[in-house]
């Protein structure tokens, strides 16, 4: 179980280290500003989703340090580089084998329900 008072202190350390106010921090990790306010006031305990968003957005924050104060902040361990994503496979093939074929069309769907279809130019 996470000690709410100690968690609040570690959260304040993160804000100070990155020179962020609560609103900017909330925006950076993609949570409501009130969530940060409730955590800093001790009203709420952190959710797993919240903790994961913090360590995802700020790789120097050690998960174990954030949860229970063990480890260091900022984390002195090297941050692994993000691996490049593999090229997309053709889902019609039912496998993950890469397909070397021409693009037939590209369709962009908009939130209002409309769409736009783009056809590749056939200049060869």
Image: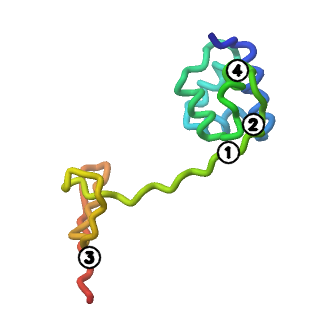
Which numbered disc, 3 or 4, marks the residue closer to the eye? 3
Residue holding disc 4: 40
Sequence-earlier tag: 3 or 1:
1
Residue holding disc 1: 79
**Viewer-side residue, 27 vs 63:** 63
Residue holding disc 3: 120
Colour convention of the picture: rainbow
Which numbered disc, 2 or 4, marks the residue closer to the eye? 2
Marks 1 and 2 in Cβ contact (< 8 Å): yes
Sequence-earlier tag: 2 or 3:
2
Whether 67 is drawn above or below 78: the answer is: above
Which quadrant does the N terminus fall into? top right
Q: Quadrant of residue 2?
A: top right
Query: Cα distance, mark 3 to mark 1?
Result: 40 Å
Q: Is residue 89 left or right of residue 5?
A: left
Query: Cα distance, mark 1 to mark 2?
Result: 9 Å
Query: Cα distance, mark 2 to mark 4?
Result: 22 Å
Sequence-earlier tag: 2 or 4:
4
Q: Dot 4 lies on which element?
A: helix
Residue at screen point 64% across, 26% down: 36
Which numbered disc, 4 or 1, marks the residue closer to the eye? 1
Query: Cα distance, mark 2 to mark 3?
Result: 48 Å
Residue at screen point 26% across, 76% down: 120
Residue holding disc 2: 75
Query: Cα distance, mark 3 to mark 4?
Result: 53 Å
Q: Residues within 10 Å of mark 4 (few under 14, many from 20)?
A: some
Q: Could you say where residue 32 lies in the image, as x and y percent from the top left?
A: 56, 30
Q: Quadrant of residue 103?
A: bottom left
Q: Dot 3 lies on which element?
A: loop
Query: Cα distance, mark 4 to mark 1?
Result: 27 Å
Q: Residues within 10 Å of mark 2 (few under 14, many from 20)?
A: some
């Amino acid at each position: 179980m996470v000690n709410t008072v100690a968690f609040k202190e570690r959260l304040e350390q993160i804000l100070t280290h990155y020179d962020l106010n609560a609103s900017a921090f909330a925006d950076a990790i993609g949570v409501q500003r009130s969530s940060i306010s409730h955590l800093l006031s001790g009203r709420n305990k952190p959710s797993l989703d919240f903790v994961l968003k913090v360590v995802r957005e700020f790789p120097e924050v050690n998960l174990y340090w954030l949860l229970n104060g063990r480890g260091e902040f900022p984390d002195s361990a090297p941050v692994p580089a993000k691996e490049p994503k593999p090229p997309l496979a053709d889902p019609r093939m039912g496998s993950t084998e890469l397909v070397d074929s021409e693009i037939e069309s590209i369709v962009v769907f908009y939130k209002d329900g409309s769409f736009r279809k783009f056809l590749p130019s056939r200049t060869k």
